[in-house]
Image: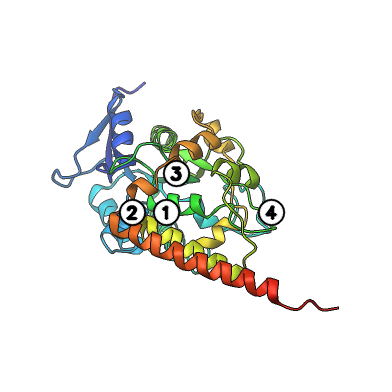
Amino acid sequence: MSDRVTTVLVRGDDGALGERVTRLLADRRDLSVVDGDAADGPVDVVVDLEVGDHDRIGARSASVTSFGDELLDELVRRSPTHLVLVSSALVYGAYRNNPVPLTETAILRPEHDFVFARQLAGVELAVDDWRRAGTDRSVSVLRPAVVMSGAHGPLGGTSALARALAAGYGRRLGREDPGAQFVHIDDLASAVVRCAIERADGVVNVAPDGWVPGDRVRALGGGRLRLPLSERAVEVITSLTWRLQRGPIPPGLDAYTRSFWVVANDRLRALGWEPTVTNEQVFVEGTEGAWWSSVTPKRRQEAALGAGVVTVIVLTLSLLRLLRPRRR
């Protein structure tokens, strides 16, 4: 058995996931974490946590594609033989005819209007081209479900995108809500390290066992009031709610709250990984009292104003329905 130490470069080690991944890698004697600010030089493994980081990309007013180009440049400079790329299960798309659950063999059908997922799929294809261009290269593409954590702040682990998705479930009246999956950031970190060690080649889904039924998600979310409103009215209210959390609702994201896109974790389990937190536990921990405490005073003022406007609209519509003559 070789005593050679594998060198690993972690891109995005200053974020919530990066801090956890770096700590787990540093605990292993057979791995050596390379400082990304050091002079360029070859490494054995590159772990990229930036391309799939929605908040990081938004903070830089950049695109997934530009982050992907930076990654490809890094691969040229570092000449690794293995890459671990954290993407997202969002690239599968949310459709009524999706298999339940989705396996790694499912085709990529990201919602066309949701640019983040569409560009992620594009980066995955570019990375696969890089893999096939060398005889000794392999790539682990991790596609996690909605990633959450109970901690808040820069290293908390629940992104604005995750909060938006969590807030979007259970809003429709008289319709069956799709099931949902939520993976704890610590479990995702251990999955990243497992794929780096095993050099798993190909796509690897990351999620706890099973999923939470739609009605259960609604119950865990506090049993939101479900008013008899039109789809358009629901969209307006949802846009207000999501804007208060981290800005306007990204176009196309709402589709992911309407249909199944849950994934199977069989391949990751076969690598020796096991989830430590269930879907329900992650959802409760990641959403309990989190969003309102992070809203600025200005946003809260907007919330009060928006709520007043919505209330007037709802009451007016209800009154008109009561006064409308019934057909005989």
Instruction: For mark 1, give the secondary structure.
Output: helix
**Mark 2–mark 1 distance (CA, rounded to whole Å):** 8 Å
- Residue contact between numbered discs 2 and 1, judged by CB atoms under 8 Å: yes
- Residue contact between numbered discs 3 and 2, judged by CB atoms under 8 Å: no
Q: Which residue is mark 3?
A: 147
Q: Is residue 120 toward the left or the right of residue 19 in the image?
A: right
Residue drawn at x 57%, y 72% as measured from the top left: 316
**Mark 1–mark 4 distance (CA, rounded to whole Å):** 23 Å
Q: Which residue is mark 2?
A: 55
Label 4 is placed on what type of residue? Glu
Mark on residue 176? 4
Label 2 is placed on what type of residue? Asp
Q: Is residue 275 above or below residue 176?
A: above
Instruction: For mark 4, give the secondary structure.
Output: loop
Which mark sits nearer the N-terminus, 1 or 4?
1
Question: What crowding class fits label 4: few (fewer than 14 Cα within 10 Å), some (14-19), or many (20 or more)?
Answer: few
Residue 315 is situated, as x and y percent measured from the top left of the image, at 57, 67
Q: Is residue 135 above or below residue 233?
A: above
**Which numbered mark, 4 or 3, is in the foreground of this view?**
4
Q: Name the quadrant of the C terminus.
A: bottom right
Label 3 is placed on what type of residue? Val
Question: What crowding class fits label 3: few (fewer than 14 Cα within 10 Å), some (14-19), or many (20 or more)?
Answer: many
Residue 294 is situated, as x and y percent measured from the top left of the image, at 33, 48
Judge by depth and name the residue closer to the eye, 210 or 73.
210
Q: Name the quadrant of the N terminus.
A: top left
